[in-house]
Amino acid sequence: MIEVRELTKRYGGTTAVDRLTFTVRPGRVTGFLGPNGAGKSTTLRLILGLNAPTSGTVTVHGRPFRDRLRGLRHVGALLDAGDVHGGRTARAHLTALAVSNRVPRARVAEVLAEVGLTDAAGRRIGGFSLGMRQRLGIAGALLGDPPVLLFDEPLNGLDPEGVKWVRGLFRRLAAEGRTVFVSSHLMSEMEHTADELVVVGRGSLIAAESLAEFAARGGSASVAVATPEPAVLAAALTAEGAVVREAGGDLTVTGLDAARIGELALRHGVPLHQLTTRAASLEEAFMELTADRVEYASGATR
Ligand SMILES: Nc1ncnc2c1ncn2[C@@H]1O[C@H](COP(=O)(O)OP(=O)(O)OP(=O)(O)O)[C@@H](O)[C@H]1O
């Protein structure tokens, strides 16, 4: 279990992490989601004790992680896949990690096989693609067979087959009872990967709940309407307080439900060819919730 309490990290005038409180439980995949610059990497470094918090606490199984000897057996982490010695072979890299963490060397071949790098074990990491580096980083995290695993943007650079493989791996690790905490800036990546979500924006907590709860709370549902008289219907709906967008003659309506739209169409004598309620996607819920917390928004005003 990872417990983060009132965690704050400032760098000069920048508050990277702002009084964050959440718990990551074992047996599930927890997605750590937020726009770029939201403070995810900083939080992961604080969990690992690589940086000291300005205030607040973070514990892994009840103790600050840096107090533990032989770290890799307690927490496995992939923070930055590029942060490896390019001149080393994959096997040499993992062997050095194993030795310094007193992990049996036999684990090296096991994790190489697990991530599909057996054939590349003798090649220098400098020639690896980003996807191969991610696999190697994941192998390093798995080396000590730890109960807690942290991954920072592990799907970056993976091809669709790789993404599918990582998802399966995370599921399996969680099913084995481990704590799996995975960061991403894309809801689409987490939608099919995570059971639980911790969502942050500009360093502070936006939500900590199950994926289902998150889906239920955010994003307004809309109704797609097809009619041969879009202008007449749009005017009637707008007069009732709906927000209407028109694209290619079809209307997308928010603020009124399908039944009310049907009644208004009937009252104005407008035929309807289609009337479909569309649930908000998780992506829309995420965008809505984080819209005012994006550090580098596109467009002039914020
Ligand atoms: N060592 C540092 N010195 C100064 N500012 C920092 C440092 N590390 C992070 N920051 C700032 O803290 C904020 C959070 O950064 P962080 O990398 O934790 O976000 P993130 O959510 O991981 O984003 P990304 O997905 O872009 O990596 C940013 O404004 C960043 O510029």
Image: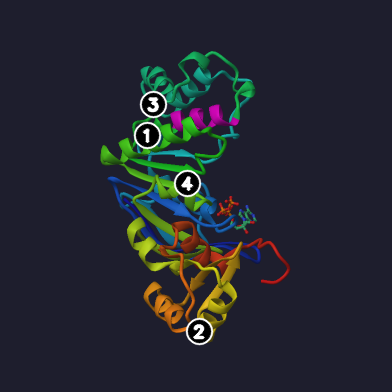
Circle 4: element type: helix
Identify the main secondary structure in magenta: helix
Q: Determine the secondary structure under disc 1.
A: helix
Going by the numbered disc 4, the residue's amino acid type is Glu
Whole-angstrom CA distance, mark 2 to mark 4, is 35 Å
| Label 4: few (<14), some (14–19) or many (≥20) C-alpha neighbours in 10 Å | some
The amino acid type found where label 1 is placed reads Leu
Q: Is residue 212 above or below residue 167?
A: below
Q: Nearer the viewer, mark 3 or mark 2?
A: 2
Horizontal relation, residue 253 to residue 175: left or right: right
Mark linked to residue 189: 4
CA distance separating discs 3 and 2: 66 Å
Disc 4 versus disc 1: nearer the observer: 4
Does residue 100 show up magenta in the picture? Answer: no
Q: CA distance from mark 4 to mark 1?
A: 14 Å
Q: Which residue is mark 3?
A: 102
Circle 1 sits on which residue?
169
Q: In which quadrant of the rendered view does residue 169 lie?
A: top left
Residues at marks 3 and 4, CA–CA distance in whole angstroms: 34 Å
Residue that numbered label 2 is attached to: 241
- Amino acid type indicated by mark 2: Gly
